[in-house]
Image (cartoon, rainbow, N blue to C red):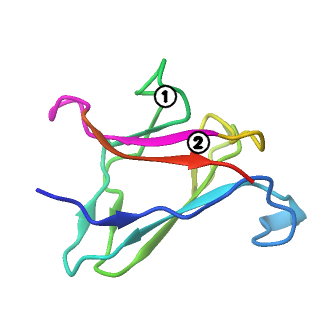
Amino acid sequence: MMRKIAIPYMCTNTVTIHMIVTLSIDWIECHNTSKRIVDFSEIYLCNSQMNLRKWQFTGQTVIAPTGYLIVWVDSDDTDWTELHTNFRLSKNGEPLTLIDTDDLGNQVLDTIRCRV
């Protein structure tokens, strides 16, 4: 099944979205441009081609039709109710890659180059 996803991102967040206690945290926004629910359960996100399975979306992670999902890219292991990756984005630029599930062979679904 083809997934239609747009992934804007924020590297070096200083003026856009602020978390509780006014932390300036980088984030990515996943936008489902389709008219169907998109299931991100067990899909991976990484910033390194050396480790394509760096961070995994939790089970039951879905994006409603034309909906959005924010993922905080802050290397924070705290048990938040929001999604937080185990890596950060470099302001110097790096790839951000979405990888399919283990069951579907970890194929690259999309890659963008993150830069300020």
Which residue occupies the foreground of this view, 67 or 48?
A: 48
Discs 1, 2 touching: Cβ within 8 Å: yes
Q: Give the amino acid type for the residue marked by disc 1 in the picture.
A: Lys
Furthest toward the left, the residue is 1
Q: Position of residue 89 (x, y in %)?
A: 69, 42
Q: Give the amino acid type for the residue marked by disc 2 in the picture.
A: Thr
* Side of 5 where 26 appears, left or right: right
Q: Which residue is mark 2?
A: 85
- SS of the residue under disc 2: loop
Q: Magenta stretch: give its range.
A: 94-106
Tell me the quarter of the picture where residue 13 sits: bottom right
- SS of the residue under disc 1: loop
Determine which of the numbered discs, if any, sits on residue 32 in the image.
none
Total numbered circles: 2
Task: Name the residue located 65 percent from the left edge and 48 percent from the top edge.
Answer: 73
Q: Position of residue 63 (x, y in %)?
A: 34, 69
Determine which of the numbered discs, if any, sits on residue 54 in the image.
1
